[in-house]
Image (cartoon, helix red, strand yellow):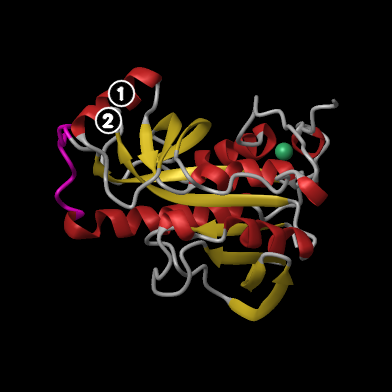
């Protein structure tokens, strides 16, 4: 398999289902759908489960990523629905993530919790694999309007939305979009040595932000259309095989 896709809110189906693999990990069992795309097979799972039944702070991130690794997958692309803290990013826009800020609390953040698992530290200079980002940028050029821009993702604890004061704080920190799931997903991928990258779809303006002019011809279908664009972009980006020779993802462990 060339890789796998993790879907978020509004992205529950990747199409062309071949079979479902039930993977038993040390953290729980995960059903991974195997789909066909062109001549390749890809893995797919939705982090919130069927019917959006798992809230962001209770997603079994460790099991999800471990299951993909156990299937031999080395490249993972994720979709996330976000609020925008950047007036240039409006409803329906696709944003290529370049960096992240962790504003969660109380989540289990690492596979290496001391004891038998030991203590390990990982480099996060590239939270989102630079090789996968390059591949997605190239793929997006043939799929206008492509990305609206690149952005920094701030992960809130949720499930409540942010207050207006929190959104002002996130903007001062340099955050462009705010969601509830990329921590610990991105860092657990790094701990497993996987290449991981993510694209956000703006589904609302964050609290206190003004809505700009949205193309009303899309009407209520705007977000749905963007999710379909996201789905095609992620699948097409994994159409050709990738290696791990042009990024540091498989070698992010800091020697002690
Ligand atoms: Zn990588």
Which residue, as the protein is rendered here, is positioned at the far bottom?
19
Q: Which residue is mark 1?
A: 169
Residue 124 versus residue 187 in the image, above or below: above
Left/right placement of residue 189 relative to residue 158 reads: right
| Residue at 73 percent of width and 45 percent of height | 112
Answer yes or no: is residue 87 visible. no
- Ligand 1 image position (quadrant): top right
State the quadrant of the N terminus.
bottom right
Residue 35 versus residue 149 in the image, above or below: below
| Residue at 50 percent of width and 57 percent of height | 232
Number of other residues with Cα within 10 Å of mark 2, as a class: few under 14, some 14 to 19, many 20 or more: some
Q: Secondary structure at mark 2?
A: helix
Asked if the stretch drawn in magenta spans residue 217, the answer is yes
Q: Which mark is residue 183?
A: none
Front residue (pair 226, 111): 111
Residue 75 versus residue 254 in the image, above or below: below
| Residue at 67 percent of width and 64 percent of height | 27
Question: Magenta stretch?
Answer: 208-218
Query: Disc 2 versus disc 1: distance between alpha carbons?
Result: 5 Å
Q: Which mark is residue 166?
A: 2
- Image coordinates of residue 161 in percent, x first then y, are 26, 45
- Contact check, label 2 and label 1, Cβ < 8 Å: yes
Residue 225 versus residue 148 in the image, above or below: below
- Image coordinates of residue 82 in percent, x first then y, are 35, 45
Q: Secondary structure at mark 1?
A: helix
| Residue at 48 percent of width and 44 percent of height | 199
Q: Number of marks in the image?
A: 2
Asked if the stretch drawn in magenta spans residue 213, the answer is yes
Which residue, as the protein is rendered here, is positioned at the far top?
172
Q: Main secondary structure of the magenta part?
A: loop
């Amino acid at each position: 398999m060339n890789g796998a896709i993790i879907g978020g809110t509004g992205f529950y189906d990747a199409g062309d289902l071949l079979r479902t693999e039930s993977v038993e990990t040390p953290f729980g069992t995960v059903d991974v759908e195997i789909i066909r795309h062109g001549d390749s097979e890809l893995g797919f799972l939705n982090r919130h489960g069927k019917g959006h039944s798992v809230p962001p702070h209770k997603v079994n991130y460790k099991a999800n990523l471990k299951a993909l690794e156990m299937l031999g997958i080395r490249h993972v692309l994720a979709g996330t629905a976000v609020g925008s803290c950047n007036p240039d990013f409006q409803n329906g826009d696709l944003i290529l993530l370049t960096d992240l800020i962790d504003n969660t609390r109380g989540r289990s953040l690492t596979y290496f919790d001391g004891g038998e698992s030991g203590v390990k530290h990982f480099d996060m200079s590239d939270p989102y694999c630079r090789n996968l980002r390059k591949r997605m940028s190239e793929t997006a050029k043939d799929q206008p309007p492509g990305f609206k821009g690149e952005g920094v993702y701030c992960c809130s604890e949720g499930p409540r939305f942010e207050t207006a004061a929190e959104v002002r704080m996130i903007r001062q920190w340099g955050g462009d979009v705010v969601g509830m799931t990329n921590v610990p997903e991105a860092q657990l991928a790094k701990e497993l040595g996987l290449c991981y990258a993510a694209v956000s779809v703006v589904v609302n303006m964050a609290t206190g932000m003004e809505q700009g002019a949205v193309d009303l011809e899309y009407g209520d279908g705007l977000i749905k259309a963007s999710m379909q664009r996201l789905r095609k972009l992620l699948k097409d980006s994994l159409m050709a095989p990738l290696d791990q020779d042009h990024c540091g993802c498989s070698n992010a462990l800091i020697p002690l």
